[in-house]
Image (tube, rainbow, N blue to C red):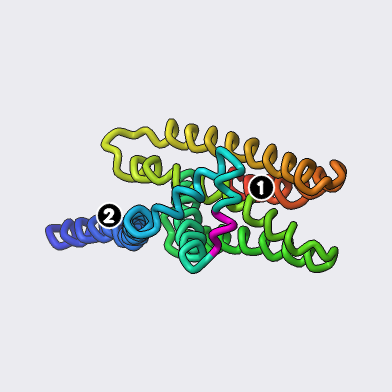
Amino acid sequence: MKICHHKIYLCVIKKQMLPLINIAPSEDVFFILLLISFLLIAIIKGVYWKHAKLFFMGVLAQRYANQYLREENGFTERVNLLTFLLMTINFTLIIVKFQEVSNLCRISLVFFSVVLFFLFKQAIVKVLGRLFKVKDLAKLAVFFSFLFDKTLGFILSPLVIMLYFFYFEISSALILVSLVLFISSLILKLYWLWKIGTNSFGLSQVYIFLYLCCLEIFPLLLLGKGVFY
């Protein structure tokens, strides 16, 4: 009987240890992603803040965005890369938290899906620019589209940190705040793209509407369907 009890006890211990073994790798991934996010913020603030500040201010006034584009050089290219990586990591962490994903493969899938989503949209805009011989317009469309997404990714950094390290359970409230910021950023982006397209380039409102629906709103609806369902 004692041996049987020991066997049962060992079986219970093994069953309890299995979830811990499965959770540990995902916790390491969260820590690594957050550590990279910290590193990116430190580099942006410490080395490239002069250009990054000008980039983020472009959300509030077009003159800052125009000045950033005029100063295009190696520094601005690095700012573009660093803010892109920060954006994809923070978006991934929020989506993973919302879906309660703890599997390493699924976390990796979410990250690469976010990266491919933005790269695919950028590629589509550039291809359309080549087809219709409006490369400069396509370049501006990509810039202003990513401007708001990258700025949102930077703003979400403290919320992501609280989402994973706050002592109390406030995930629902933080995700709601993130959703409000996302919708506000989307509305502001659509407004700026519409304004620039009509006032600066004199494009037909029909073409602008089709662009916004096909390449800004519809892909986000598909992404949102994948996240919420």
Q: Are marks 2 and 1 in contact (CB under 8 Å)?
A: no
Which of the two labelled residues, at mark 2 and mark 1, occupies the earlier sequence position? 2
Image coordinates of residue 85 in percent, x first then y, are 47, 60
Question: Which residue is rendered at x = 63% and y = 50% of the image?
Answer: 144
Above or below residue 97? Residue 3 is below
Please name which of the two marks, 2 or 1, marks the residue nearer to the observer. 1
Number of numbered callouts drawn: 2
Q: Which secondary structure is most common in the magenta stretch?
A: helix
Q: Is residue 1 left or right of residue 223?
A: left
Question: Which residue is rendered at x = 68% and y = 60% of the image?
Answer: 139
Q: Quadrant of the C terminus?
A: top right
> Are there few (<14), some (14-19), or many (20+) residues within 10 Å of tag 2?
few
Above or below residue 30? Residue 56 is above
Res 70 → quadrant: bottom right
**Residue closer to the observer: 9 or 78:** 78
Question: Which residue is rendered at x = 80% and y = 46% of the image?
Answer: 208
Q: Which residues are magenta?
A: 68-72
Name the element at disc 2.
Answer: helix
Q: Quadrant of the N terminus?
A: bottom left
Q: Which residue is mark 1?
A: 220
One can see residue 23 in this view? no
